[in-house]
Image (cartoon, rainbow, N blue to C red):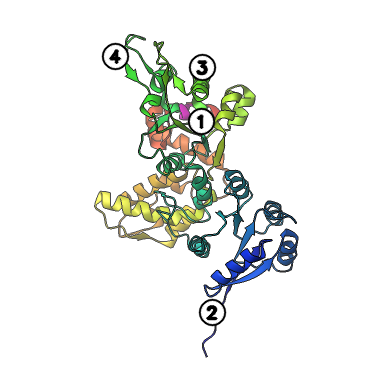
Amino acid sequence: MKKDPVLKRILLVDDEENHRLMLKINLSGKGYELVEAANGFEALSIINDNADFFAILLDIKMEIMDGLTFLSKIRGMGIDTPVIMISAFDSAGYAVKALRLGATDYLTKPVDIAQLLNLLENIGNKDEAEPVLVDNEYKFSGIYSADGLGRIISLLKMVAPTDATVLIMGESGTGKELIARSIHENSPRCKHPFVAVNCAALNENIIESELFGHEKGAFTGAIAQKKGKFELADKGTIFLDEIGEMPLTTQVKLLRVIQEKSIERVGGEKIIKVDVRIIAATNRDLKRMVESGDFREDLFFRLNVFPIKLSPLRERKSEIPLLVDYFIKRFSEKMGKRVKGYSDTFLNKLKSYTFPGNVRELENIIERAVILARGDILEGYDLPEFNEKLVGDTDLDIKNNEKQLILKALEEARYNKTKAAEILGISRRTLHNKIKEYDLEV
């Protein structure tokens, strides 16, 4: 006798009876069993008795314990069941609050059933960590798992169509520019320029010329008029990477650009209007820099309109196999090699490593491993020697790993800081700051 398939239980929390009925009718027969609650208190009682739910569909606006309060309470109880928020109000404010409290996604009423089923299917596939390159609603050219970068896709969907200034925070190599480009590509400005500026790579004497342009004769060597990055990005997006490295004098002028939406070229008097969306990124703690006087507080508040925090690779290890597969394919094709996969030993060594250099470091490791590969499967011995000294020792402090990595890069570069920075995939200024931070004798 054939057994009936096991239904996935969903807790539906909504004070509108007709809406609950509509969802129940549409989800029945699709592999889901709905348990209903008319308010947050009732739902809390149900989930206290049995927290074993596949997902929770949660209305935001309810008279008796609203959805945000309920979500906050269950997350405080350690219940990590995926939650899809539902609201009759298409408000970015509600959505951002919900997503920051740990919601998986956000839908508006009347709920699009096809969209809801797609979200539920994605939740079901979460453990498989399948790469999704293009979402039905949001184009994303990177690789992510549902419990990795996928956690912020909902935030990106909300902010991309707006003109809000975005501040992306995260360690070096976590994919900040990838996120910035995806916001631009999904915005109304997508047909206009995306101009990336690495503030850490620009000398203090030329950064203003690079950002705002200069007139002929403005300084020695200015033999012709030059447009700056803001002019080049007009009607598009400018990405100010490593904004924490920007000199205070330039911060003042950037603040004025944000406030007045206009620039002046170095050595010029003409006011030039610019229509530019700003996305900034940093691997530094800007709040501490504000406290120490190294970053302007007024500029920080102007940039921190919509903050996005990227987790380091060591906190999203479900993405490592996906990234390894992608890099193996890319480098094998590039080098004309026949590497098809990797052994369990190879993957386990990578997973036990803390990756102070994040995705960029993993990319470099796989490129070297493909070069060293003796067969079509990568083995543990294909990992470069300097990685093996760090791999597998999970007791090592992350900061110590980074320090050792910098020392090894300096050795390989014979203490040429420019070459060492290239090996590490960071700017020379960032390397200088790290050497100072770790008090290295170089």
Q: Secondary structure at mark 3?
A: helix
Q: Residue type at mark 1? A: Lys
The image shows residue 330 at horizontal and vertical percentages of 32, 51
Mark 1 vs 3, N-terminal side = 3
The local crowd at label 2, few if under 14, some if 14 to 19, many if 20 or more residues have their Cα within 10 Å, is few
Residue drawn at point x = 32 percent, y = 18 percent: 226
Snapshot quadrant of residue 417 = top left
Distance Cα–Cα, label 2 vs label 1: 56 Å
* Left or right position of 336 against 211: left
The local crowd at label 4, few if under 14, some if 14 to 19, many if 20 or more residues have their Cα within 10 Å, is few
Mark 4 vs 2, N-terminal side = 2
Task: Tell me if residue 363 comes above or below residue 58 in the rendering.
Answer: above
State the residue in front, 98 or 310.
98
Query: What numbered label is drawn on residue 434?
Result: 1
Distance Cα–Cα, label 3 vs label 4: 24 Å
Residue that sits furthest to the front in the current view: 18
Query: What numbered label is drawn on residue 224?
Result: 4
What type of secondary structure mainly makes up the magenta span? helix
Q: Residue type at mark 2? A: Pro
Snapshot quadrant of residue 6 = bottom right
State the residue in front, 291 or 60.
60
Query: What numbered label is drawn on residue 5?
Result: 2
Q: Residue type at mark 4? A: Ala
The image shows residue 373 at horizontal and vertical percentages of 32, 54
